[in-house]
Image (cartoon, coloured by chain):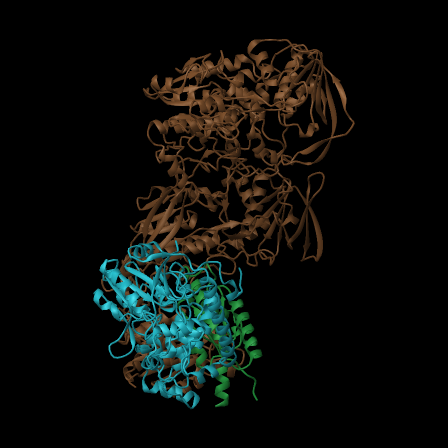
Chain colours: A brown, B green, C cyan
């Protein structure tokens, strides 16, 4: 055979030879077919070692070389170089066998190790014979470097790259660059302030023409390869455009206060904010979260959080403006809305829901409808008829009018308002309020015709003939449900609905002396309380179940009770007792509660023989209403449902007659005002689309609608937030209520209202009150901003995503989160920082309110190694704590006075850096107590004094040290999303979760993914000097690439033999990089070399072996297998 | 007669398991010399032919090592490997090459210790099972 | 959708009637061509492509012989489509193979009117010639076979057919039904729109669905399944080791006829005839060295195990491999038992549906966890 193979086994000093008899292996190799020369040598990787190979190649005219030494991942390049220098194609000529990592270091027995080495050697020798010459392909390098992370490492790397004249693109996920370093106060050991040395770098980054700064952005996807990456960056919606001048006027008016992450949440910021004064860019950002639950719960979609915040800051007009965008009748809703919003309110998780309805009413009562701005829109000469002036009708009329349409309303009663007027008694909803709000609606230019009944006085046809292009039916409908007992037609029996109608509309005050109301719903309460006010001596409510099951609103029931109305519960009507056709009593039967019915409420079961007679001269059945429109509607050509309601398409609200829409009770049966308004809104959208011939939009939306519910990112419930009682409105004193229809609920006073509004925890972050928009001279604010994707092309990438500080809460023995004056190191940094919550003063926290700071501590304990050097958390040392702990000690002495007692609880002091040891000595000389021993526990005495327990290992005894403040030096740990990042850049993590460098010593900033480099604490705990140094190293790697302008990519890519390929296309589906295209003409699959990364998914499958992976061909692997097994 | 030493061929992915083997080395974690490693770029590159060949050549066991699902340097090569292994196992089983002789394992670059454990475990298992078929034939012939 | 039309025939007329039916189809241009088994001038019956109506006379669809699995022919006709409509009369094993080939882009059904036929089995080619020489006709075969007797003289239908669970063809446009069709009658069932159109254009009269058919088919299937399971059981007990397998293949001469005959061995060039397996002398020597002996030609078991890995998932059990082997190696049970195991593992069935992706062409994140048994 013509192969002439040189075999070389390395001693690697003694690393290999101490376990493997290298000479023996060399002798063995010499006997293998094709081996022309076989040697062992002390250091093959050394220059002489390489020269040895080069010389042999010439001397023995070798065409193959096998080196058995360390892992090819270490020196394959080196030896390929040697072969190349000697004129051989390295891929063709060279193969490396790993006998160090895979043999000498992992095998205890010398014979076994030697035998294994021989086997591996023979495999390598067999393999190399079949290797083919390969030429690495060269690609241009895009000279832009992408830097991920704007901390000190990222900034430094970007600056160095910028300085070279090449471009850097710096991506930072938070709104400002700076990172942890800029949160700090001073930096050890020199004590120069972090801001003083950090902000200049930030500014420089912001201003450098060569750095493209993308803050509030995150890398989502990376494709391509070294020199030619395509990076997809997501710019999170910032809601503030780049022309923001940073004047901060917006933040002044922003009503929403939230904890500032930058200040470790111990200081508040606004919803529109910059993290700290020196932020770069000085461009504000709005913290907008998921739509708050209150707004979601409101059928009409009212911006609840918005108007609540407006009440808080006393801007009642803006509160009203916000309401009027969705609620045409704020005063009415403020009184009668069943407030579904309050049931969803997250404040309840702390104490009680915010009294939203009362706040709505307060705002409505304290602002002017006249001042509510109307959108400036051109008049549209399209006529719309709105039939019925209940809440649904009013909504449709008002919002269509706001859009500029010509609207006419038609009402069957003599006054507009529908059930609002006829059904709700005046003491709950004063007519003045209703009139005022309806008048305002009409004042926008809506005509109203009363006393005209649809289906009698006018028909659809009439409306059409009068040029109405769209018609809305909001005709409500209520027919009382009968008791179906004897003598129900007797004189003195009147159903609640007509009873209330007469009182409300006809001012008729007649009533019985002894009135019995049957039922337990809101209408029953209304009827009872109205009867009382109309002069009845005794009013009783007869209800079949107990108070617990009553469907009426709690406040209504309470009101009725306060007013002396008698509740006869667990009682059902049996028959009406009459005396010449006049009611004289109600025969009742006692009930007891049986098993639950399908409404979930326990079913009342009559007790046999418990009948008795309740004396009365008037009976008001109020057991509910049903809808019955069949007669009129069907006459008018509409389809109706089984329940007699109008049948419509519930997305478009269109009836079975084109161009005619409907909403409200007529569709859904008796329901709440706000539900009617919600229906109205849907109808408004539908009618507008109908008139613009855009009905198909509904279809598209349906397709577009996602079923998956995105999880909510609400503002978290503030930990240990103080409990605050819910404000209660004032009530008209009960004594005076008889005979008076005065409003009972007098609402909240201003102080109470603002106090109540302040209880809102702003689930949605920004409350969209839009005060900022008015404030902003630069017109930079855009509340409709959305996330934007951008694809950036770069030749190299530096990952500098930094670290997270460990959260010590789970390490409960130190009491963090329980004891006010246990701080984390970062909290202390912010405390000490001039821009922090105390403007740099070191103060204790108030026991009861952690956001309040009181006085300087007289004594402080600093606990080292919290979560570091601790097998329960992190085994590794975080490397910075000892030094910043000393820094804290110094700062405390400096700021709180020399008499302050400082105790450092440490395991070992690690002061290894330049000037560190000196600093240690200096701090000790300042009289800081150093106690050698890790603190085991922190307890708090009633006085609030904290006691640190530890073993002083030098004195060998347990100590209990009382202090006023404790600082926990928490571990540096990998970012929470480290795995996501790793996958995005296809790099790996080490056992601690930090990013894995290519080699711990020789390649500390490069990764297995060529073109991707590491800088800073994302690779492992580091202090500032080390991070900066590493950043410069990473920058150098990238600059080397950019400067060379060209990159060699390994030729181990896939190749498909067109003579063998049968075009089944399976490989195309398996290729993760879509690197395989199909040649329709030749009917074969073809690999695109520039895209192929050589994973072999295709070759691993292709049955005919048409798809091959270069340098890993069947023949080569077979030979290796032979070598391993056959000898 | 001397203790039976099973022969194991390892096909290790360059990015995870092969690196783990290097790590095991640098951390001096010793394990049985029975395994001989062939370097692959990805577990998805391992053609069933290679496994068949290894067994026909007298291997007592074959261990394919790849990255954990989701961590594959080539996105999803390991998932393809998993299906191929499932298929091939059915064939080998039919001819008395038990499932215990043919392993696929996820071993990440940082899991040098797991590599050690897996190799120890597999070697032990194979010693229990005794000679692989082709060796049996070899001994006989 | 299933509609039936009846094709009545008196004894000896089956082929002429069928000929008329297809002739009519060609004349009416329902299709431009017909691929169906035709009697050959001297002897034998071969699939034949007919484009001119006058040549349909030679048709003999039910002749109990399958010289080649016609899926391969269908592939040749359609992998680079002619654009002309072809009616193909195929057996279930051929159709199932064809469906796998379609998934592998080796055939296209757009222009094909797929006609399946009830299959009662085939004789090996040589046996069929004898059968023919002795003057037996397809009708005779049908008659006996329906009565449960497929054997004639000392020979019987191929082992593969004896254990075939698919006497009736699925995934077709039309189906020629003889099982429980009633004597002197052949029913043509349409199962797709395509099929319905084609059938309506013929002058055949409608027929009701044959009541007995379902039962009859079921019985036949069950019988065959029992036979199959019995064979599999025996086979697995005997051929259960590499040694046993080597004995099975002792006579193998690497002629690769099995793979040539295999309808789903779809490679243009088998990897075993490529360079990869062209070894040089010292390699053979080193193999011989390692064991002191090396059977030649080498790589036989390697070839067959690899073929199992390649087509085990597609094998339809037509048995052409056995028929093709010059040394009477009984490959069918070997491959069918493996096919059953591998296909079951992926709950896949070769030829069941064009829409089922082939197991190794797809993959998912959370599946086959048991392979590694590791969870992070």
Q: Is residue A36 left or right of residue B64?
A: left
Instruction: Please state the total of marks drawn on the protein image.
Output: 0
Taking the view exactly as shown, the residue that stands out farthest to the right is: A609
Placement of C172 over or under A1104, stated as above or below: above
Q: Nearer the viewer, residue A402 or C40?
A: C40
- Residue A375, visible in the rendered structure: yes
- Residue A65, visible in the rendered structure: no
* Residue shown at 51% from the left, 61% from the top: A991
Q: Name the quarter where the N terminus of chain A is drawn.
A: bottom left
Taking the view exactly as shown, the residue that stands out farthest to the front is: C10
Q: Nearer the viewer, residue A239 or A430?
A: A430
* Quadrant hosting residue A41: bottom left
* Residue A936 screen position, x and y as percent: 66, 52
* Residue A472 screen position, x and y as percent: 42, 23
* Residue C367 screen position, x and y as percent: 49, 60
Q: Name the quarter where the C terminus of chain A is drawn.
A: bottom left
* Quadrant hosting residue C307: bottom left
* Residue A900 screen position, x and y as percent: 63, 42
Q: Nearer the viewer, residue A300 or A356?
A: A300
């Amino acid at each position: 055979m013509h192969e002439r193979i040189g075999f070389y086994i390395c001693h690697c000093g003694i690393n290999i030879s101490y376990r493997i008899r290298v000479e023996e292996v060399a002798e063995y190799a010499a006997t293998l077919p094709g081996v022309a020369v076989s040697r062992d040598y002390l250091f093959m990787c050394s220059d002489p070692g390489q020269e040895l190979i080069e010389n042999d190649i010439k001397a023995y005219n070798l065409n193959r070389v096998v080196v058995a030494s360390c892992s090819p991942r270490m020196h394959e390049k080196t030896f390929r170089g040697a072969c190349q220098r000697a004129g051989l194609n390295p891929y063709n000529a060279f193969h490396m066998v790993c006998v160090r990592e895979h043999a000498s270091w992992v095998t205890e027995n010398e014979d076994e190790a030697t035998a294994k080495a021989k086997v591996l050697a023979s495999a390598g020798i067999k393999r190399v014979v079949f290797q083919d010459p390969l030429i690495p392909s060269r690609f241009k390098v895009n000279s832009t470097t992408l830097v991920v992370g704007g901390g000190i490492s990222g900034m430094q790397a970007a600056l160095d790259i910028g300085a070279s004249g090449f471009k850097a693109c710096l991506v930072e996920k938070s709104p400002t660059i700076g990172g942890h370093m800029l949160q700090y106060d001073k930096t050890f050991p020199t004590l120069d302030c972090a801001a003083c040395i950090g902000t200049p770098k930030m500014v420089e980054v912001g201003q450098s023409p060569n750095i493209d700064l993308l803050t509030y952005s995150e890398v989502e996807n990376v494709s391509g390869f070294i020199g030619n990456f395509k990076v997809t960056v997501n710019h999170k919606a910032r809601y503030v455009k780049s022309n923001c001048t940073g004047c901060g006027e917006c933040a002044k008016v922003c009503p929403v206060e939230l904890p500032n992450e930058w200040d470790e949440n111990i200081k508040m910021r606004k919803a529109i904010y910059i993290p700290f004064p020196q932020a770069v860019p000085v461009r504000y950002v709005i913290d907008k979260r998921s739509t708050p639950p209150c707004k979601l719960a409101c059928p009409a979609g009212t911006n609840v959080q918005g108007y609540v915040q407006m009440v808080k800051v006393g801007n009642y007009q803006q509160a009203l403006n916000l309401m009027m965008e969705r609620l045409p009748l704020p005063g009415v809703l403020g009184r009668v809305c069943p407030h579904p919003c309050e049931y969803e309110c997250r404040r309840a998780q702390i104490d009680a829901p915010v009294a939203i309805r009362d706040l709505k009413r307060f705002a409505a009562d304290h602002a002017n409808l006249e001042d509510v701005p109307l959108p400036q829109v051109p008049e549209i000469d399209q006529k719309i008829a709105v039939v019925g002036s209940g809440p649904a009708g009013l909504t449709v009329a008002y919002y269509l009018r706001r859009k500029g349409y010509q609207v006419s309303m038609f009402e069957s009663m003599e006054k507009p308002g529908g059930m609002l007027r006829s059904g709700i008694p005046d003491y709950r909803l004063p007519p003045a309020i209703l009139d005022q709000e309806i008048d305002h609606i009409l004042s926008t230019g809506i005509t109203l015709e009363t006393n005209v009944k649809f289906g009698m006085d006018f028909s659809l046809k009439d409306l059409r003939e009068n040029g109405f292009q769209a018609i809305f039916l909001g005709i409500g409908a209520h027919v009382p449900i009968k008791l179906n007992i004897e003598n129900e037609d007797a004189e003195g029996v009147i159903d609640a609905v007509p009873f209330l109608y007469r009182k409300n509309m006809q001012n008729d005050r007649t009533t019985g002396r002894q009135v019995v109301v049957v039922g337990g719903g809101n209408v029953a309460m209304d009827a009872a309380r109205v009867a009382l006010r109309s002069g009845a001596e005794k009013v009783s409510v007869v209800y079949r179940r107990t108070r617990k099951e009553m469907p009426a609103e709690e406040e209504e029931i309470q009101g009725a009770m306060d007013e002396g109305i008698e509740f006869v519960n667990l009682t059902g009507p049996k028959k009406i007792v009459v005396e010449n056709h006049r009611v004289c009593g109600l025969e009742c039967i006692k009930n007891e509660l049986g098993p639950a019915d399908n409404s979930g409420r326990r079913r009342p079961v009559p007790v046999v023989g418990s009948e008795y007679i309740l004396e009365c001269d008037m009976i008001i059945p109020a057991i509910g209403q049903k809808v019955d429109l069949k007669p009129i509607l069907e006459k008018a050509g509409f389809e109706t449902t089984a329940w007699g309601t109008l049948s419509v398409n519930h997305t478009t609200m269109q009836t079975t007659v084109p161009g005619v829409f409907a909403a409200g009770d007529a569709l859904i049966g008796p329901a709440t005002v706000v539900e009617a308004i919600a229906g109205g809104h849907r109808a408004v959208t539908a009618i507008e689309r109908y008139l613009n011939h855009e009905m198909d939009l509904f279809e598209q939306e349906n397709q577009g609608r996602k079923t998956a519910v995105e999880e909510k990112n609400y503002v978290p419930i503030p930990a240990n937030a103080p409990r605050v009682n819910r404000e209660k409105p004032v009530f008209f004193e009960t004594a005076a209520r008889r005979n008076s229809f005065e409003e009972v609920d007098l609402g909240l006073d201003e102080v109470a209202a603002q106090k109540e509004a302040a209880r809102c925890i702003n689930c949605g972050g920004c409350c969209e009150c839009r005060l900022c928009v008015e404030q902003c001279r630069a017109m930079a604010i855009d509340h409709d901003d959305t996330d934007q994707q951008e694809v950036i092309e770069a030749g190299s990438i530096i990952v500098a995503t930094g670290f997270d500080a460990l959260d010590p809460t789970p390490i409960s023995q130190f009491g963090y989160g329980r004891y006010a004056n246990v701080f984390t190191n970062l909290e202390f940094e912010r405390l000490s920082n001039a821009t922090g919550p105390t403007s740099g003063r070191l103060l204790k926290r108030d026991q009861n309110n952690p956001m309040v700071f009181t006085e300087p501590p007289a004594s402080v304990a600093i606990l080292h190694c919290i979560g570091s050097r601790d097998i329960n958390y992190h085994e590794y040392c975080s490397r910075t704590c000892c030094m910043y702990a000393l820094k804290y000690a110094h700062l405390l002495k400096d700021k709180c006075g020399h008499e302050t007692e400082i105790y450092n609880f440490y395991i070992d002091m690690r002061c290894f850096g330049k000037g560190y040891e000196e600093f240690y000595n200096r701090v000790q000389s300042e009289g800081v107590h150093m106690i050698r021993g890790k603190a085991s526990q922190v307890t708090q005495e009633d006085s609030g004094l904290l006691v640190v327990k530890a073993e002083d290992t030098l004195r060998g005894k347990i100590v209990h040290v009382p202090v006023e403040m404790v600082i926990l030096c928490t571990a540096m740990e990998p970012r929470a999303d480290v795995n996501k990042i790793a996958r995005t850049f296809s790099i790996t993590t080490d056992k601690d979760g930090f990013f894995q460098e290519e080699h711990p010593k020789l390649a500390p900033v490069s990764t297995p993914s060529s073109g991707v480099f590491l800088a800073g604490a994302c690779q492992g705990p580091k202090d500032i000097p080390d991070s900066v140094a590493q950043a410069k190293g990473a920058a150098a790697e990238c600059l080397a690439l950019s400067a060379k302008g060209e990159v060699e990519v390994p030729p181990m890519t896939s190749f498909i033999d067109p003579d063998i390929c049968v075009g089944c296309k399976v490989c195309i589906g398996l290729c993760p990089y879509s690197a395989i295209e199909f040649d329709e003409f030749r009917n074969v699959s073809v690999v695109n070399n520039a895209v192929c990364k050589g994973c072999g998914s295709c070759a691993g499958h292709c049955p005919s072996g048409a798809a091959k992976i270069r340098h890993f061909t069947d023949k080569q692997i077979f030979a290796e297998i032979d070598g391993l097994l056959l000898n | 007669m001397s203790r039976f030493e099973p022969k194991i061929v390892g096909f290790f992915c360059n990015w995870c398991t092969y690196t783990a083997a290097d790590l095991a080395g640098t951390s001096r974690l010793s394990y049985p010399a029975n395994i001989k490693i062939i370097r692959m770029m990805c577990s998805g590159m391992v053609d069933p032919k290679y496994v068949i060949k290894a067994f026909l050549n007298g291997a007592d066991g074959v261990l394919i090592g790849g990255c954990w699902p989701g961590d594959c340097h080539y996105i999803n090569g390991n998932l393809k490997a998993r299906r191929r292994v499932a298929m091939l196992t059915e064939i080998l089983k039919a001819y008395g090459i038990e499932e215990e002789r043919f392993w696929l394992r996820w071993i990440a670059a940082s899991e040098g210790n797991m590599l050690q454990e897996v190799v120890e475990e597999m070697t032990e298992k194979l010693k229990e099972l005794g000679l692989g078929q082709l060796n049996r034939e070899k001994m006989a012939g | 959708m299933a509609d039936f039309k009846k094709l009545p025939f008196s004894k000896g007329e089956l082929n002429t009637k069928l000929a008329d039916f297809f002739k009519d189809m060609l004349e009416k241009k329902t299709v431009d061509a017909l691929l169906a088994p035709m009697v050959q001038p001297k002897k034998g019956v071969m699939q034949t492509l007919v484009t001119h109506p006058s040549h349909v006379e030679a048709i003999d669809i039910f002749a109990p012989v399958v010289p080649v699995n016609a899926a391969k022919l269908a592939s040749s006709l359609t992998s680079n489509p002619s654009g002309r409509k072809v009616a193909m009369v195929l057996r279930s094993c051929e159709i199932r193979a064809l469906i796998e080939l379609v998934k592998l882009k080796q055939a296209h059904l757009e222009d094909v009117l797929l006609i399946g036929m009830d299959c009662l089995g085939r004789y090996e080619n040589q046996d069929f010639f004898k059968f023919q020489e002795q003057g037996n006709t397809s009708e005779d075969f049908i008659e006996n076979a329906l009565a449960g007797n497929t054997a004639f003289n000392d020979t019987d239908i191929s082992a593969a057919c004896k254990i075939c669970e698919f006497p009736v063809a699925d995934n077709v446009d039309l189906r020629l039904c003889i099982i429980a069709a009633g004597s002197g009658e052949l029913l043509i069932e349409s199962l797709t729109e395509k099929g319905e159109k084609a059938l309506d254009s013929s002058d055949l009269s409608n027929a009701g669905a044959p009541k007995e058919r379902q039962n009859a088919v079921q019985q036949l299937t069950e019988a065959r399944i029992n036979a199959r399971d019995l064979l599999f059981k025996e086979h697995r007990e005997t051929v259960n080791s590499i040694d046993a397998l080597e004995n099975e293949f002792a006579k193998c001469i690497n002629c690769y006829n099995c793979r040539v005959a295999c309808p789903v061995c779809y490679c243009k060039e088998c990897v075993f005839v490529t360079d990869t397996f062209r070894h040089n002398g010292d390699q053979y020597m080193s193999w011989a060295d390692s064991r002191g002996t090396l059977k030649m030609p080498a790589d036989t078991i390697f070839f067959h195990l690899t073929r199992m890995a390649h087509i085990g998932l597609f094998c339809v059990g037509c048995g052409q491999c056995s028929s093709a082997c010059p040394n009477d190696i009984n490959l069918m049970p070997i491959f069918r038992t493996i096919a059953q195991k591998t296909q079951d593992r992926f709950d896949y069935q070769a030829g069941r549906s064009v829409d089922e992706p082939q197991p190794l062409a797809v993959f998912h994140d959370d599946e086959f966890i048991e392979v590694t048994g590791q969870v992070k």
